[in-house]
Amino acid sequence: MNKWKFYTSNEIKPLGWLKKQLEIQAEGLSGNLDKIWNDIKNSAWIGGDKEGWERVPYWLDGFIPLAYLLQNEDMIARAKKYIDAIISFQKPDGWICPCKDEDRKTYDTWAVQLITKTLTVYYQCSNDERIPDVIYKTLKNYYDLLKSGEIKLYDWGNARWFECFIAINFIYERCKEEWLKDLAKILKEQGMDYNKAIPLWERPLNRWRFDTHIVNIAMMLKSEAVSCGILGEEYMDNAEKLHEILKKYNGTPVGLFTGDECLSGLSPVQGTELCSVAEQMYSYEILYAFTGDKKWAERLEVLAFNALPATISDDMWTHQYDQMSNQIACVNFPGKAIFRTNGSESHLFGLEPNYGCCTANFNQAWPKFALSVFMYDGNTVINAVPVPAELKTNDKHIKIETEYPFKNTLNYKIKAEKGFTFKIRIPSFAENLIVNGEKASGDMLSFDIGAGEEKEIVISFDTVPYFEKRPHDLNTVKCGSLVFSVPVKSEKNMLEYERDGVERKFPYCDYELIPVSDWNYAYCADALGIEWGEVSEIPFSSENPPVTVKATVKKINWGYEDGYDTVCAKIPESREPISEAEEIQLYPYGCAKLRMTEIPLI
């Protein structure tokens, strides 16, 4: 097993479009939640009277690495203010969550698992030497309470038991104490076994369950990778087995599994919750680091370049709870929602559509993706994801200049004080690979960098757009890691209001997107042509996409889902053309907020 290790935010810095994306996030909702949202601003975690469970730890889990990656001193200071407050309320016995002592038995300890994970992230960014002792005391208290039977896992803590292993592994590496192994065993014994839920994944029902909950499942995919070591178990790649089942019965064109809010089948008009995008990305980052298997890195790219930007507005002040592959409108349903277990507002762009978990949790996706660009194993460094960034350590400096995934040229500039091996993962779909002017092949390039050497490596390759078959005899257009959709132009209907003491006002109000262009198309020719533009200040711009694909289409009588006039039918009512052929520009899925992604080829 090839275990790559992660660098810290002090060693990796984003460049180019990736830095722009993080800056937009910092200027939007992520960077301002503590100023505008009571569940963060006045949380019980810092002595207030609002939510004291998952939302502050969720937000900090992304806000902290975002602050340090951008070296934003104001954000770093605000993160420290929250961490200082959380630490100050830790009880002498180690209990850290904001509840009364007598309420511990009924307090869902998912929050214990989450806050220790978040504190681990804070230490890796800040090197604050208080943190290991705080985590140690929290875990020891958790162990004592679970071991004695005073508390036990239930509900979310039961479903997410493996999340605690991020902190358990961190502390075990420092102290090697046996009680941590016992804690690991208790958590697994009391935690949910998702393999037993597989029959429920094959035929999703309109029923809310923990074992079909899409976010739980996205988190779970990394469970074996984070737990097998300390449990002394052989790694069996259970994640791949479960991934294939989920893909077969609930897969989407952008690597997600439908879940609105629980698994929802193969319909292109069922949604996927944003929290699951962030958590599935994190699972793939962990899985790639643990296994070194390229499939996880490629799957990570597909999520990051498609599913993530698609469900967040260009300015990153608003987001959806649920995204849909075929999403022709984001308009409040006047009656029953199309979603299995989510409400009528779930696909609107807003501050807190449906539930606030995604408001807090989507923040981790881009920063942790940035921290996965480079990884290392001893004296070997790998570029796991070829996006613009630089690595600076005491004895090496590597810079990648690129506009990938929008263009396929990678320019590496390397300086080394000490010799090391540098590996570059090449995507499996790369064609006509050229390295420093010479034809090359393979999915992993390796270079021996000598002490004192300065080296430049220029890599280019081609990607060709193609049709991929989807269920129901539909098709999706792909090119490399990018998925392309028919974009649907829209008008915004801004909704400003107050609910439960939470104000929605520009720029963090709610928006309905009302379609103003045609969407009822079918592809009618095999030819696809790619056109490159410029990467703008908004990398995944809905107005100015950096790359498009030309396709030939005809209109068809697609129709609507029964009972709706803002949801297209799952399957077209007719595939007979009702217009002449025309050429249109397909947008990257991540740029098209309204879109048709799965359509016929006639």
Image (spheres, rainbow, N blue to C red):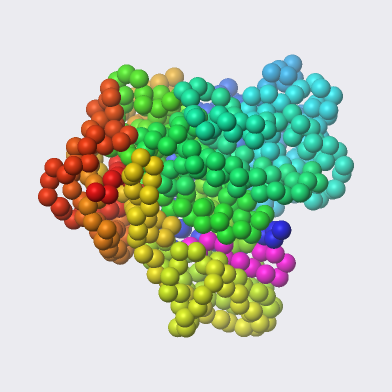
Q: Position of residue 6 (x, y in %)?
A: 65, 57
Task: State the image coordinates of residue 219 (x, y, percent, origin top left).
Answer: 60, 40
| Location of residue 137 by image quarter | top right
Q: Residue furthest top?
A: 102
Expressed as whole percent of the image width and height from the top left, the position of residue 439 reads 47, 81
Span colored in magenta: 376-387
For the N terminus, which image quadrant?
A: bottom right
Q: Residue furthest right?
A: 178
Residue at 59% x, 33% y is 198
As for residue 383 lying within the magenta part, the answer is yes
Residue 512: in sight, yes or no?
Answer: no
Q: Is residue 506 above or below residue 343?
A: below
Q: Quadrant of residue 398?
A: bottom right
Q: Is residue 337 above or below residue 371?
A: above
**Quick one: 82 or 95, which is closer to the camera?**
95
**Residue 482 in the figure: left or right of residue 88:** left
Q: Residue 187: x, y in percent? A: 75, 33
Image check: 218 left or right of 515? right
Indicate the quadrant where residue 562 lies: top left
Identity of the residue drawn at 63% across and 28% down: 156
Residue 442 visible? The answer is yes
Instruction: Using the image as rendered, state which of residue 37 and residue 478 is in the foreground.
Output: 478
**Is 51 inside the magenta-drawn segment?**
no
Left or right of 520 in this view: 163: right
Q: What residue is drawn where x is 81% and y is 46%?
A: 232
Q: Is residue 165 above or below residue 477?
A: above
Residue shown at 75% from the left, 24% from the top? 152
